[in-house]
Amino acid sequence: MPAWLKDAVFYEIYPQSFKDTNNDGIGDINGIIEKLDYIKELGCNALWINPCYDSPFKDAGYDVRDYKKVAPRYGTNSDLYRLFGEAHNRGIRVLLDLVPGHTSEEHEWFLESKKAEKNEYSDRYVWTNGAFCGIGGHPYIGGEADRDGCYMLNFFKCQPALNYGFLNRTADWQFAPDHPACIATREALKDIMRFWLDHGCDGFRVDMADSLVKEDDENKSATGKIWKNIREMMDSDYPEAALVSEWSNPHQSLKYGFHADFYLDHVGNGYNTLIRDNESEGGDHSFFKKDGNGDIMRFLLDYLPKYDATKDDGFISFITCNHDTPRARRTLGYDELKVAYATFLTLPGVPFIYYGDEIGMRYLEIPTKEGGFARTGSRTPMQWDNSKNYGFSDANPDVLYLPQDNAADAPTVEAQKNDPASLYNELKAVISLRHEYQDLNADASFEVIYAEKEQFPFVYRRGNLLVAVNPSNTKASASLKGEAFIKENDESKTHSALELIHSIGSASFSGTTLVMEPSSFAVYKLV
Ligand code: GLC
Ligand code: CA
């Protein structure tokens, strides 16, 4: 486990929408470099940059045409190497996005693979042995190549599946995962990883990490074997590099070698019940919605078993949002976001802040771009200040990668920096608290102190810190009588034994009862 991860607070950058320095309307690597001081000032010490490789951009860059080349619209490889150096000078690590399950249909490997004549890349992708032989249970394309076969897709039509084999085989064109062609795919992936790690990158966020071996068993054990092999390479040659999975099943991913796994927004899971419950039927009962009448137990019943079973293997990553998910601002107001994000940043694991969430950027209802569809509204250009295009670019507004929030009260970094009560300043304060107290590190202990069905507040302990959360719009209290850290026999000491070190709204003790005002959050130090 790279030691730096314990204290890491990540910032996810969607490169096309962060900062444009050459006025073509699209963000670029130089723009990220220009804003490193901003990221550092916020307190983030690690970045995840979405795919910035050469691509036809039919899935916004997740359709990679050349894994080893920066897309010209973002700059050059030297720009990216310079970004690694500039970030490191500021104590910031940089994760790139690794897309192991598929390439673009324009990748050189695929152009070779689809040829009728057998060649080195014929088996790099999953092909059937006849143009009329389709693939049951998986999306595929037939009739598009000279080669007499159909090929499997991993996501969109533009993304043919790389061949890591099949665990349970039902046809003779399916290879075993240890077939030399499948091992060659794995080795090609390792070669890409080495290329970027050797140039100074600090690891990868891995796209659809569970999608490698087809017809895998329910534990994804064959896919897991590949990641274990890759982790061995990292442990021996790049022990400081980190691997974070898009898997959302820590029981599997963390056992197979990932250092951290995202707690993704899946309808009805624990994360979803906290801030995104609006995505299911029956009204929005998100825990962090003031009037949602939420229930912290819906979260804990999902989270605790995951946490307990995997806390010695790696970290579960809470996200404010990501490029695939509607921004939380769509349904939550600033008060609610402050309490929600403060909670995410004080729970165990390695947190990720999606660019723009620190100021509560809106989800915009806009037409699709580059395969974004409903995701497009979360991908709009960063709002830095009140100058042209909110300081994102000097280009004509109509050539911007995506339109921006035109509301009169559109949030900007500049305005929120100047407002002590802003979401930005709250987030910054909690991030700094997280760096100050080892008890808030990713691996520090976590114990639920007070959580009752359909009740507020939610109180938990991290080492010698007590964190209390009341997102509801009513006053809430919790009796902490009987807790070892409450000096029951001498109630007068209760107050001095708990030192308030951070709060949103107000919280206080009445004897051994914690009383919290609406929309409040408090961190106490047990002294
Ligand atoms: C992941 C990415 C998403 C992409 C897909 C296919 O889910 O986060 O943006 O479209 O994989 O690569
Ligand atoms: Ca640009």
Image: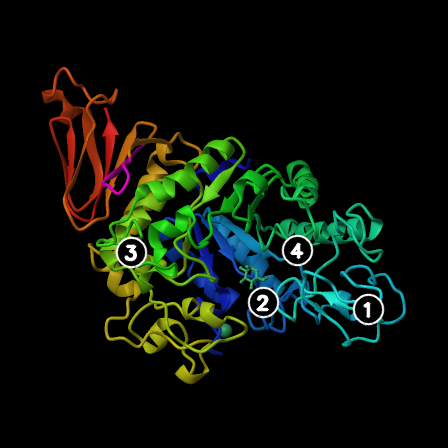
Q: Nearer the viewer, mark 4 or mark 3?
A: 4
How far apart marks 1 and 4 lie (CA) works out to 22 Å
Asked if the magenta segment contains residue 456, the reply would be yes
- Alpha-carbon distance for marks 4 and 3? 35 Å
- Residue 422 x/y as whole percent: 23, 57
Label 3 sits on a secondary structure element that is helix
Question: Can residue 345 be seen in the rendering of this structure?
Answer: no
Q: Amino acid at mark 3?
A: Tyr
Ligand 1 closer than 8 Å to label 2 CB: no
Q: Residues within 10 Å of mark 1 (few under 14, many from 20)?
A: many
- Of marks 3 and 1, the one in the foreground: 1
- Badges 3 and 1: C-beta atoms under 8 Å apart? no
Location of residue 160 by image quarter: bottom right
> What residue is shown at x 11% (from left), y 26% (from top)?
511
Residue that badge 1 annotates: 149
Question: 53 left or right of 419?
Answer: right
- Percent x, y of residue 1: 55, 35
Kind of residue at disc 4: Pro
Q: Which residues are magenta?
A: 451-460
Place of residue 413 in the rendered image (x, y in percent of width and height, measured from the top left): 31, 63
Asked if 68 appears above or below 345 in the picture, the reply is below
Q: Quadrant of the C terminus?
A: top left
For residue 61, which numbered disc appears in the image?
2
Neighbours of disc 4 within 10 Å: few (<14), some (14-19), many (20+): many
Q: Amino acid under label 2?
A: Gly
Amino acid type, mark 1: Gly
Q: Which mark is residue 100?
A: 4
The residue that disc 3 covers is 424
Magenta stretch, main secondary structure, is loop
Depth check, front residue: 340 or 288: 288
Mark 1 or 2, closer to the camera: 1
